[in-house]
């Protein structure tokens, strides 16, 4: 199975070096110098992973990260010379799957890229990675393979919507997920307009059933996060 990586980087020399470093029999690599070209590519192709520079000649990578996460289910690694903690936190809160500052070791980059590709394959084919769909968090036990959920040994019944919502929250524990991203993930059929109030109601029901008020936190103005103690 061949994965395709998209590198969005305006430094031609760096983009070429990354392409050579990451290309293999199992992985093809495409590059583009800016957001306009990247948007066209994403309209017509699917990618296993995106490497996204923040400072681009025709736009801001942070803004494009939000667009990617709202429209596509594609992991994103941010590449930037900005090593400020606030920038890293902002990227992760907006849905980035990883963040690498320049200059960086190619060996570390390869390792992080492979980690994201493995995670993507596990999510697409849960049977390949059963442990990735089982979580033990304090007194909670969540088994998304068997669809069994419990707190302190007591089984809890969750609706399909609540299961999907819980899954994306615990899978991204510690990362704030926007309301738009959650709505697009949970209500994927696109058959009807989903009012934002539906998400608020689903969150409340999930909190109440799990007694997880200390875990499912509201990040005002942004969305929600599963925050472990």
Image (cartoon, rainbow, N blue to C red):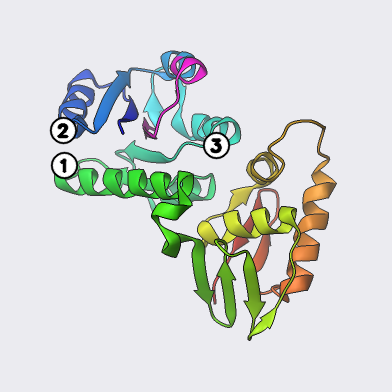
Badge nearest the viewer, 2 or 1: 2
Do the numbered discs 1 and 3 sit on residues whose CB atoms are within 8 Å? no
Q: Is residue 215 visible?
A: no
Going from N to C along the chain, the mark reached first, 2 or 3, is: 2
The residue sitting at 77% across, 72% down in the picture is 209
Residue at 19% across, 22% down: 16
The answer to which of 83 and 94 lies nearer the viewer is 94
Residue to which mark 3 is pinned:
69
Cα separation between marks 2 and 3:
26 Å
Choose the circle earlier in sequence order: 1 or 3. Answer: 3
Apparent side of residue 57 relative to residue 157 in the rendered image (left or right)? left
Task: Report if the CB atoms under discs 2 and 3 are less than 8 Å apart.
Answer: no
Which residue is rendered at x = 66% and y = 48% of the image? 222
Picture residue at 25% right of the left edge, 31% below the top: 27
Q: Find the magenta span and give its range.
A: 41-53
Question: Which residue is label 2 attached to?
Answer: 21
Q: Is residue 97 left or right of residue 174?
A: left
The residue indicated by pointer 1 is 106
Disc nearer the start of the sequence (2/1) = 2
- Mark 3, secondary structure of its residue: helix
Q: Could you tell me which secondary element the residue under label 2 belongs to?
A: helix
Above-or-below relation of 108 to 47: below
Name the quadrant containing residue 160.
bottom right
Label 1 near label 2: C-beta < 8 Å?
yes
Left or right of residue 177: residue 106: left
């Amino acid at each position: 199975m061949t994965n395709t990586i998209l590198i969005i980087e305006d430094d031609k020399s760096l983009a070429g070096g990354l392409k050579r470093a990451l290309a293999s029999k199992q992985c093809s690599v495409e590059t583009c110098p800016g957001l306009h070209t990247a948007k066209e590519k994403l309209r017509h192709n699917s990618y296993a992973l995106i490497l996204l520079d923040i400072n681009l000649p025709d736009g801001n990578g942070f803004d494009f990260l939000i667009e990617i996460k709202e429209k596509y289910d594609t992991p994103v690694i941010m590449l930037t010379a900005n090593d400020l903690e606030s920038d890293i936190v902002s990227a992760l809160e907006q849905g980035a799957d990883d963040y690498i500052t320049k200059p960086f070791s190619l060996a570390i980059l390869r390792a992080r890229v492979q980690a994201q590709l493995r995670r993507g394959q596990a999510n697409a084919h849960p049977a390949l990675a059963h442990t990735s769909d089982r979580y033990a968090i304090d007194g909670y036990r969540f088994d998304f393979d068997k669809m069994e959920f419990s707190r302190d040994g007591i089984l809890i019944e969750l609706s399909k919507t609540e299961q999907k919502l819980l899954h994306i929250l615990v899978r991204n524990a510690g990362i704030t997920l926007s309301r738009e991203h959650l709505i697009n993930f949970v209500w994927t059929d696109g058959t009807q307009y989903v009012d934002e109030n539906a998400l608020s109601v689903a969150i409340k029901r999930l909190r109440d059933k799990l007694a997880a008020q200390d875990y499912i936190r509201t990040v005002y103005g942004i969305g929600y996060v599963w925050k472990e103690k």
